[in-house]
Amino acid sequence: MSVQIALLRGINVGGNRVLPMAELKAVLEGLGAVDVRTYIQSGNAAYRGELDQDDISGAIFAAKGFRPDVVVIPLESYGPILAGNPFPEAADDPKALHVFFLAEPSVADVAQLAALKGPDERFLLTERALYLHTPDYLSGSKIADKLERLLGVAATGRNWRSVQKILEMARAIDG
């Protein structure tokens, strides 16, 4: 079984759509995942198994009554996404560098994204990720809150520190 990374969007925010990581782990194990590990409360898991986003989202709906967006990425794809960071100098401030993982390739209008970004913001859209450097952090970003609508596909973002920790966690499972 291969190592997969599951990233959930919009859980445990402001007391809504609450899903403790122990319950996420139990859901994944109930679907047949093994060696399940989680990282912080924002919905990050790594495991051995062949689950897809629909499996996970449906099981969470059955257990908790809400259906989060889930992006599942094989470890062999996740590492190269991180290695493709076009703003390596921004990694020194991990709260200013984000990776938005796409559930499927986006057909976003890159010119429209560029027109909406702040003057100091930079981004690069690839087939499975959008890298966003926001020197004023997400709270000061002009496009961060509009990204999913503009991308036209389900996406979930993590800061650079989190994506690195998730990679370490998944590699530990892989041995």
Image (cartoon, rainbow, N blue to C red):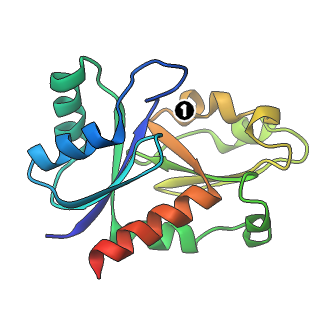
Q: Residues within 10 Å of mark 1 (few under 14, many from 20)?
A: some
Point 10% across, 46% down: residue:
31
Most foreground residue, 132 or 174: 174
Which residue lies under the disc numbered 1? 148
Q: Residue furthest bottom?
A: 175
When the figure is inspected, residue 26 is found, relative to residue 97, above or below; the finding is: above
The answer to which image quadrant residue 141 occupies is: top right
In the image shown, does 75 or 117 lie closer to the viewer? 75
Residue shown at 68% from the left, 35% from the top: 144
> From this viewpoint, is residue 12 visible?
yes
Residue that sits furthest to the right in the current view: 119
Q: Which residue type does callout 1 highlight?
A: Glu
- Name the image quarter holding the C terminus: bottom left
> Looking at the image, can residue 142 be seen?
no
Q: In this image, 14 relative to 11: left or right? A: right
Residue 73 drawn at (x, y percent): 34, 58
